Image (cartoon, rainbow, N blue to C red):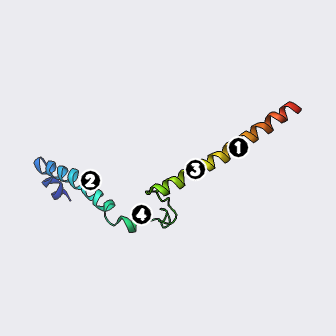
């Protein structure tokens, strides 16, 4: 052991340190950058194509989606107005 330490003096120590500074990050990136699918795989994490949203591209599809969104907004608005009317009616009778 002391023979190794005697050899790592002066310039040899600097070369060894420089090599460690270079090789350690490269080794770290190689270890965590290879075989990622097997090492960090969580099954069922990402939605499948059937579960994800399909972006409409055709004009008819876009019009159908806009009509659906506007109908949903109208239903929500109607519920909100009904709820506000019920709350104001409860406050007036109390």
CA separation in Å, label 3 and label 2: 51 Å
The residue that appears at 72% across and 44% down in the rendered structure is 79
Read off the residue under disc 2: 25
Q: Quadrant of the N terminus?
A: bottom left
Read off the residue under disc 4: 40
Q: Quadrant of the C terminus?
A: top right
User: Where does residue 81 sit, x and y in percent of width and height?
Assistant: 72, 39
Looking at the rendering, which quadrant does residue 31 occupy?
A: bottom left
Q: Are marks 2 and 4 in contact (CB under 8 Å)?
A: no
Q: Considering only order in the chain, which callout, 4 or 2, is on the residue closer to the N terminus?
A: 2
Read off the residue under disc 3: 69
Mark 3: which secondary structure? helix
Q: Is residue 49 above or below residue 18?
A: below
Mark 4: which secondary structure? loop
Q: Residue furthest left?
A: 11
Q: Residues within 10 Å of mark 4 (few under 14, many from 20)?
A: few
Read off the residue under disc 1: 78
Q: Nearer the viewer, mark 3 or mark 2?
A: 3
The residue that appears at 20% across and 52% down in the rendered structure is 22
Q: Nearer the viewer, mark 2 or mark 4?
A: 4
CA separation in Å, label 4 and label 3: 38 Å
CA separation in Å, label 1 and label 4: 47 Å
């Amino acid at each position: 052991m002391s023979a190794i330490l005697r050899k790592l003096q002066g310039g040899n120590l600097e070369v060894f340190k420089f090599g460690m500074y270079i090789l350690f990050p490269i080794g770290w990136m190689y270890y965590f950058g290879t075989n990622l699918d097997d090492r960090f795989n969580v099954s069922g994490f990402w939605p499948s194509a059937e579960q994800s949203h399909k972006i409409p591209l055709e004009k008819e599809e876009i019009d159908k989606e806009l009509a659906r969104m506007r109908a949903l907004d109208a239903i929500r608005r109607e519920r909100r107005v009904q709820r506000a009317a019920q709350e104001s009616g409860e406050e007036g009778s109390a």
